[in-house]
Amino acid sequence: MIIIKTQEEIKNLRIAGKHLGEILSILEKEVAPGVTPKELDARARFLIEERGCTPAFLGYTPHGVSYAYPAALCVSVNAEVVHGIPNNTPLKEGDGVSIDLGPWYKIVVVDPARTVPVGKISHELSELLRITKESLFVGIHEAVAGNRTGDIGNAIETFIKPHKYGIVKELAGHGVGRNIHEDPYVPNYGQKKTGALLKEGMVIAIEPMINLGKAGVIFDKDEYTVYTKDRLPSAHFEHTILITNGEPEILTNY
């Protein structure tokens, strides 16, 4: 069921988004060679709680998983597409690392992510990050009342195809706000004028996951981490978007 958000919920989502923008900007500056994902997770938890929020991912059990997620932050390095569980392996110069988190603020939650370079990275990886981020904004442009989720996916797919990157199809964006994952399903590919109708007051997370190599992925035995099948790097960018009568509003702007 698609949930249209109330004006009070939208007000709180804007506040939550502002907090998340600040937190992600701080975390991005702290990503460096030698830092561990667990250290980033501890820092994220502190920053979330410092702002009067609660880590939404910590203790959350997605459908089909046998245990709760054990951290506040997802840290996915290189060939890890999404949902990497923070560990004690230090980041290295040249890595690409996706940081993904969500806070509960009062009774609402937002869900943004970004992939950042660790020190100096290769031109190939830099281009993957740049193009993936651009594809997010191409998708956001289509997130207007009267369009459908297929318009978002088609725009992202059309933009990515000339670059010969792999578009992950096993995972997608989603509704968000009262819960971490809500309807509708928002894929990063598809046909125009298909899928759920976008209406004013809907809140969705758009999150292209784009692989340097082929599109195939595998799910790790830890039940959370998703890897590229060919073990080439992946990039992930995400914003939470409010559907309005006019231009889409980015609630998690950073």
Image: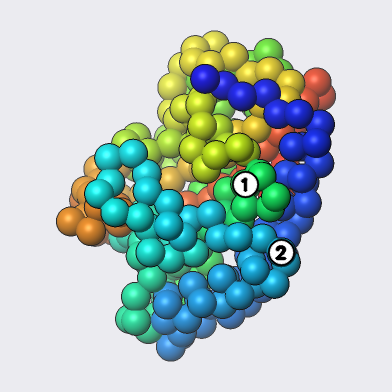
Answer whether residue 186 is visible to the viewer in this image.
yes
What residue do we see at 58% from left, 48% from top? 111
Q: Secondary structure at mark 2?
A: loop
Q: Is residue 157 left or right of residue 66?
A: right
Please name the residue that numbered disc 1 is placed on: 109
Percent x, y of residue 22 = 72, 65
Q: Is residue 68 left or right of residue 54?
A: left
What residue do we see at 61% from left, 24% from top? 3
How many neighbours does mark 1 have within 10 angstroms: few (below 14), some (14-19), or many (20 or more)? many
Q: Is residue 167 left or right of residue 182?
A: left
Q: Are marks 2 and 1 in contact (CB under 8 Å)?
A: no
What residue do we see at 80% from left, 36% from top? 8
Q: Amino acid at mark 2?
A: Gly
Q: Is residue 60 above or below residue 240?
A: below
Percent x, y of residue 85 = 35, 65
The residues bearing labels 2 and 1 have C-alpha atoms spaced at a distance of 13 Å
Rendered image: mark on residue 220: none
Task: Please tell me in which quadrant of the rendered image residue 203 appears.
Answer: top right
Which of marks 1 and 2 precedes in the sequence?
Answer: 2
Q: Report how many numbered discs are placed on residues in the image.
A: 2
Answer whether residue 119 is visible to the viewer in this image.
no
How many neighbours does mark 2 have within 10 angstroms: few (below 14), some (14-19), or many (20 or more)? few
Percent x, y of residue 219 = 23, 49
Rendered image: mark on residue 52: 2
Q: Amino acid at mark 1?
A: Val
Q: Is residue 77 left or right of residue 48?
A: left
Q: Secondary structure at mark 1?
A: strand
Which quarter of the figure is the C terminus placed in? Answer: bottom right
In this rendered view, identify the residue nearer to me: 73 or 179. 179
Camera-side mark, 2 or 1: 2
